[in-house]
Structure formats: C-alpha cells, structure tokens
Image (cartoon, rainbow, N blue to C red):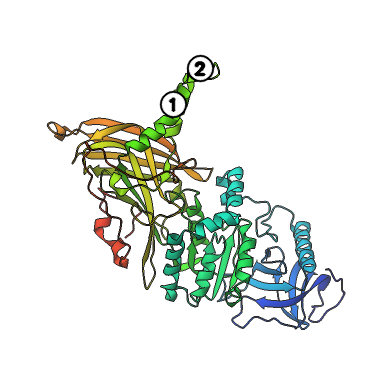
C-alpha cells in the first residue's frame, strides 16, 4: 500500500518523497552483523534526489542505506519477502564487487505487490524498456539471455512445465541411487559446505539445498526457473531449522543476480547420455558467474562411456515395428512406399533401457568433461574417436553408452554411476542400434567416431560410424571390410524400460568376456592416473 508523504526522519533536504512502503524487517546483506528485524518499524522509500530516482531504506526513522534505481534489481522471494540488489560505487568485502543488497519483508501481500508494481513503473518511466529490467518474478524483461538465444521457446516452455510438476520431481527423488549418492557426497564432505555460501543450480524441489544446509552451509541460494520454485519455498519453509539459511530465487541462472559469490556450486544437471537437455551448459555458466576463484563444483567431473554391443533380440524388435508399413492393402491402400522411411525412422531412435553387461563386445572407453574447466561453447559439439578390440566373435548391432560423475570432495570423493550391472537409475543406459549390423571376430579391431552436435530443442543429434578392419592374412594393409553408420536424435529416444531384460546367449554364439562395473570406492588421485588418459582409449578435455 502506498503512503504519500512530504517528510520523514533521516530524509535529506534534496529528497523529494514520492511513496513509502512499511516493512516488518530489513536485512542489509552486505554487513557481517545480524539481520535487523522484529517489531521495529521499517520503511522502503522511493524518492527523487536532485532529479534522479532512488530507493532508500529506513529503520526506526534512521536511514540505513539505499540503492540506485537505474541499476537496482528486485527479486520476490515469497509472498511478502523480497531482495533488492544494485551495483554500487562502493566496494564491500562481503559481496561480489560493487554490489549492495537488502532483504526486506512487507507486512502484507498487498503492500508487497504495490511496491513491485511501483518499482517497475519507475524503471519504465525513467529508463525506458531498453535496459536490463529485472522484476518480481526474477526474470529478465526485454533483453534476451544467452539461454533464450540458443534454445527454442517452445522447447523451453515444455521443459520448464515438465520440471514444474511434483510427480516428475518425485520420480527423481525416488531414484535412491541418485538421491542417496548426492546426500552422501554432501554430508561426507561437510568441510566443503560448513560456513560456506552455496548456489544450487536448477534447484527443483530444493532437496539439494536442504542437504547443503544440513551440512552447515552459511547460506544457500536455490535458483529454479520453473514453477517448482514455489513448491521449493513451501518445502524449505516446512523445515524451519534450515529455512533461514536458504533463499529460493525464481529465474534462469543466465539472468539472475546474487548478492554474493559462492564457495561451492551443487546441481543435478545430468540428462540421458549426460548431456541431454543441455543443462550442463547452464551449470558451467553458473560456475563462471557465481563461483569464487578456486571454488568447488558438485559434481566436478563427468565421463561418457562407450562400447560396442550385440543384441539380436533388440534388433529384431525394432525392425519388426516397421512391418506395419509392408501391407499392400491396408483398407485398400498400399503402405509399402513408406516402409523404407519408417524402417530408418525406428532405427534413428536411441534406445533407453537397462541391459545386461554381457552384451558388450569389447571393453569400454570414455570421454572426460571437467566441469570446472570446460567452456560452455565446448559443449555445443562433442567428438569422441572410437577404438575397440572385440573380445568375442559375434554380430555388432551398435554402441552402448552410459555415464558417471565424480563429486571430488575434500574428505571423501564419491562417484555416481549409471553403468550396466550397477544399481539401476532413472537415467538407465542408452544404445544406438544400426539398421545394418556387421560381424567381428575375437581380437578384431573396431574403429569409428561418435559425433554429437547440439540443437535448439535442448538436445543433440548423434552421428555414429563404426568399422571393422580386415582380420587374418593381409590385415597389415589396414583395409576396412565393413562399415555401419547412423544418425540418431537424442531428443526422441525409444524408452524400452518396461520391456523384460532377460538375456540368453544363442547356443552358437561365443560368450563375451564379462564386463565389471566400475568400483565406486576411488581415491582423488584415481582420476589423475595416466592410464585413464591414454589417447588410444580415451578422448576429452585435458584433466591434468
């Protein structure tokens, strides 16, 4: 509610009062002292100073500070809570450079809405629509963010709608491998969180923010762009022992501003094959924007594992789907002209399921992505050279992929894996199946390339090629006998997770060597071992 006035305690002679808004509490986030709150009357005042608009705060009639309206940004943290941030000429040791911030609480929702509406009107009136205007929702007004420039609007709308629903959050929370590993990684590394500022990137329900607060974080900023931010506020408010140290900010990490830098970032940015949904890019951007030099990122490193596989049952299952289009008289219509296109269409879908590791034809290789070093642009195109040695004579139907991530904690490094044979996660594994498989002999070399190119529907197009070199006499000439290739859309997979996963090798097929899933009990130096980085087996970003 607005309260016109012509005078007030602490007002400078040059000030011309416009409107005042009563507050129940004010906290100067740039100060070490405890928050000023309680029954003491406070006030937010929008006024002109020598013709220029500005925002100032008063407590018990005393001026406790203010912000320049042109650079000020206002975030609504809840129905009656907001935080006001602005670039200031003064430097504070506690905040990011040249930043001042106040957390304010109104007495009623009506007064909160009136303040935000009036503030926006002042921005529009004095500075127009051309500048970076951040309003109560925490989103940017007119200028497009990096996210909006590279992602199709319809894809983003569906993405945020999906993650704004509690049923999908429940699906992830009930992935106990995922949630339990995150919890262990945080609580076992309290030294990395205790007394530290944490940013939760894509906070969702806020569960990771609550974990960080449990581990003793001084303050957690939970950034969430979907409507799930409101649920996160409710969940956090329902845990009062932790809620005073968590602030939920609704907005994209590419757009929001924070009142201070973070010591550690925590996030769950992984999609199918690690990179689907392209949230890794937002995670990397958040590190560049909010993390102090030398700060930590949980997770720290990701690895994409690749190996050829043989699965005649899966191949027949996919090929059989196209038989519908081989009908010569479907209600008197010949469907066969479309059979070829349908056949290729089914094989362009990557298969998401949990498979038996005995289906692997060779030992896997992996591609490393170090989230603390990689640039956002490096994730636009990912190229992985492939080189395997077959451990069994069989038919190769394509490649199988999975990923793992490392939480490189100071006390206990911990891996989260989605490997076949390990406890199943909601990510499962992914397989790209060739329309034309080929045969290999035990000991035969298989080479190729996995090339992934990002697109604006928040996913990747996968280009895969595998070749089997000549075996036996004349092999030294390096001639290639067979090559298979395929193009796959990671955005449109075939979810086979409801299908039975029983495996029985044909009697005439040699048993492949068993694949042992990665041991999760690793030491920090394990990821530095040179045997993990031999160029003939692995590719990726320099991790040294």
User: Residue 402 vs residue 222: left or right?
Assistant: left
Question: Mark 2 = which residue?
Answer: 329
Left or right of 71 on screen, residue 163: left
Residue 172 in picture, x, y percent from top left: 50, 57
Quadrant hosting residue 526: bottom left
* Count of marks placed on residues: 2
Q: Residue 221: horizontal and vertical position, in percent?
A: 57, 67
Secondary-structure class at tag 2:
loop
Is 435 placed above or below 498 here? above
Q: Quadrant of residue 64?
A: bottom right
**Is the residue marked by circle 2 packed among few (<14), some (14-19), or many (20+) residues within 10 Å?**
few
Q: Secondary structure at mark 1?
A: helix
Counting from the top left corner in percent of width and height, residue 209 is at 54, 68
The correct choice, above or below, for 14 with respect to 499 in the image is below
Q: Residue placed at 77% from the left, 61% from the top?
A: 117
- Residue found at x 60% / y 46%: 158
Query: In the rendered image, which residue does mark 1 sit on?
Result: 323
Residue drawn at (26%, 38%) of the image: 506
Judge the density around disc 1: few (<14), some (14-19), many (≥20) Cα neighbours within 10 Å.
Answer: few
Query: Residue 80 at what x, y percent from top left?
Result: 72, 69
Residue 11, relative to residue 478: is it above or below?
below
> Which residue appears at 65% of the width and 55% of the height?
140
């Amino acid at each position: 509610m607005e309260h016109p006035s012509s005078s007030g305690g602490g007002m400078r002679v040059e000030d011309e009062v416009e409107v005042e808004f009563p507050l129940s509490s004010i906290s100067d986030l740039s100060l070490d002292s405890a928050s000023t709150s309680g029954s003491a009357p406070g006030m937010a005042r929008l006024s002109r100073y020598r013709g220029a608009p500005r925002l100032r705060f008063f407590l018990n009639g005393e001026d406790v500070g203010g912000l320049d309206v042109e650079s000020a940004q206002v975030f609504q943290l809840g129905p009656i809570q907001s935080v006001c941030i602005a670039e200031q000429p003064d430097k504070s040791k506690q905040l990011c450079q040249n930043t001042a911030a106040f957390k304010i609480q109104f007495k009623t929702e009506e007064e909160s809405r009136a303040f935000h509406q009036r503030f926006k009107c002042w921005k529009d009136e004095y500075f127009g629509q051309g500048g970076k205007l951040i309003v109560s929702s925490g989103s940017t007004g007119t200028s497009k963010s990096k996210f909006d420039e590279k992602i199709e609007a319809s894809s983003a709308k569906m993405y945020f709608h999906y993650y704004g629903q509690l049923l999908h959050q429940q699906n992830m929370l009930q992935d106990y491998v995922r949630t339990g590993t995150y919890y262990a990684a945080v609580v076992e590394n309290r030294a990395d969180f205790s007394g530290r500022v944490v940013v939760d990137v894509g906070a969702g329900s806020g569960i990771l923010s609550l974990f960080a607060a449990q581990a003793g974080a001084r303050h957690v900023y939970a950034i969430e762009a979907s409507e799930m931010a409101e649920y996160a506020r409710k969940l956090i408010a329902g845990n009062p022992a932790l809620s005073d140290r968590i602030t939920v900010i609704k907005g994209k990490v590419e757009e929001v501003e924070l009142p201070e830098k973070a010591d550690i970032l925590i996030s769950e940015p992984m999609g199918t094959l690690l990179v689907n949904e392209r949230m890794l890019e937002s995670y990397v951007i958040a590190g560049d924007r909010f993390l102090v030099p030398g700060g930590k990122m949980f997770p720290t490193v990701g690895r994409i594992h690749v190996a050829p596989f043989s699965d005649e049952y899966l191949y027949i299952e996919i090929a059989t789907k196209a038989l519908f289009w081989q009908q010569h008289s479907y209600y008197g219509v010949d469907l066969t002209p479309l059979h070829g296109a349908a056949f290729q269409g089914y094989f362009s879908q990557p298969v998401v399921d949990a498979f038996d590791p005995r289906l692997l034809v060779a030992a896997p290789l992996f591609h490393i992505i170090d989230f603390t070093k990689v640039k956002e642009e490096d994730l636009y195109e990912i190229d992985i050279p492939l080189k395997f040695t077959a451990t069994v004579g069989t038919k190769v139907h394509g490649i199988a992929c999975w990923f793992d991530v490392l939480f490189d904690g100071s006390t206990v490094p911990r891996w989260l894996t989605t490997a076949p044979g390990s406890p199943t996660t909601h990510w499962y594994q992914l397989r790209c199946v060739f329309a034309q498989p080929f045969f290999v002999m035990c000991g035969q070399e298989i080479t190729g390339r996995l090339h992934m190119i990002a697109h604006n529907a928040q996913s990747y197009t996968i280009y895969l090629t595998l070749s089997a070199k000549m075996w036996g006499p004349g092999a030294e000439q390096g001639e290639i006998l067979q090559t298979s290739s395929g193009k796959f859309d990671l955005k449109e997979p075939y979810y086979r997770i409801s299908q039975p996963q029983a495996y029985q090798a044909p009697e005439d097929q040699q048993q492949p060597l068993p694949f042992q899933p990665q041991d999760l009990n690793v030491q920090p130096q394990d990821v530095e071992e040179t045997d993990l980085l031999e160029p003939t087996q692995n590719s990726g970003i320099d991790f040294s």
